Amino acid sequence: MPEQFTAAKQPSDSAQVDVRGPRFAAWVTTAVLVAVLVLAAVSTPAAATLLGVQALVFAASAYAGPRRSPYGRIFALLVAPRIGPATEREPVAPLRFAQLVGFLFAAAGFVGFLLGAPVAGAVFAGFALFAAFLNAAFGICLGCLAYPLVSRLVRRQHPSTA
């Protein structure tokens, strides 16, 4: 069972990240998904390609975590040194789950574009955009909010991992 779905552990410094990193990633994701929707109006293949790249970023982020994700590395190398030390941290597991949810929406949109259903592709990209923008602008992570519920459901299904 993946770490993000196991019983809650005491947060350690390594299981926490600077809240500004995921917000930075959400802003980059928002820009990418806006570009996907603009491209969808003029070139479905270009929109599919860009959404496919974003899906890969989501997958890498869900697998590796926010520090080792592509946007997390950019934040660590270029942004964090200029803005000072973290004053607030958040747990990694809900962020990884949120990236998994983002991957599912981006992958569904990518498949929609590939199968010649640009409206479906745009709708899934739009849902991902909505979630990314909420996180970027207001600090509301929909995947993070859903994480405790999903975690409880998974533990109920697999009591030996709790």
Image: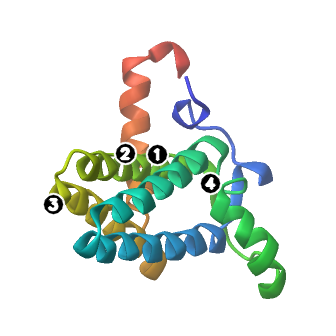
Q: Amino acid at mark 3?
A: Val
Q: Residues within 10 Å of mark 1 (few under 14, many from 20)?
A: many
Mark 2 or 4, which is nearer the eye? 2
First in sequence: mark 3 vs mark 4 = 4
First in sequence: mark 3 vs mark 2 = 2
First in sequence: mark 1 vs mark 4 = 4
Give the labeled residue for mark 1. 100
First in sequence: mark 1 vs mark 3 = 1
* 85 to 156, vertically: above or below: below
**At numbered mark 2, what does the secondary structure look like: helix, strand or loop?**
helix
Give the percent coordinates (x, y) of residue 65. Answer: 65, 49
Q: Amino acid at mark 2?
A: Leu
Q: Are marks 3 and 4 in contact (CB under 8 Å)?
A: no
Give the labeled residue for mark 3. 119
Give the percent coordinates (x, y) of residue 103. Answer: 43, 48
Q: Are marks 1 and 2 in contact (CB under 8 Å)?
A: yes
**At numbered mark 1, what does the secondary structure look like: helix, strand or loop?**
helix
**At numbered mark 3, what does the secondary structure look like: helix, strand or loop?**
helix
Mark 3 or 2, which is nearer the eye? 3
Give the labeled residue for mark 2. 104
Please identify the quarter of the rendering in which residue 111 is found: top left
User: From this viewpoint, is residue 52 visible?
Assistant: yes
What is the CA distance from the residue labelled 3 to the residue labelled 4?
35 Å
Label for residue 91? 4
Give the percent coordinates (x, y) of residue 13. Answer: 79, 54
Q: Residue at x 38, y 64 (%)?
A: 46
Give the percent coordinates (x, y) of residue 132. Answer: 42, 68
Q: Amino acid at mark 1?
A: Leu
Going by the image, does 147 lie left or right of 117? right
First in sequence: mark 2 vs mark 4 = 4
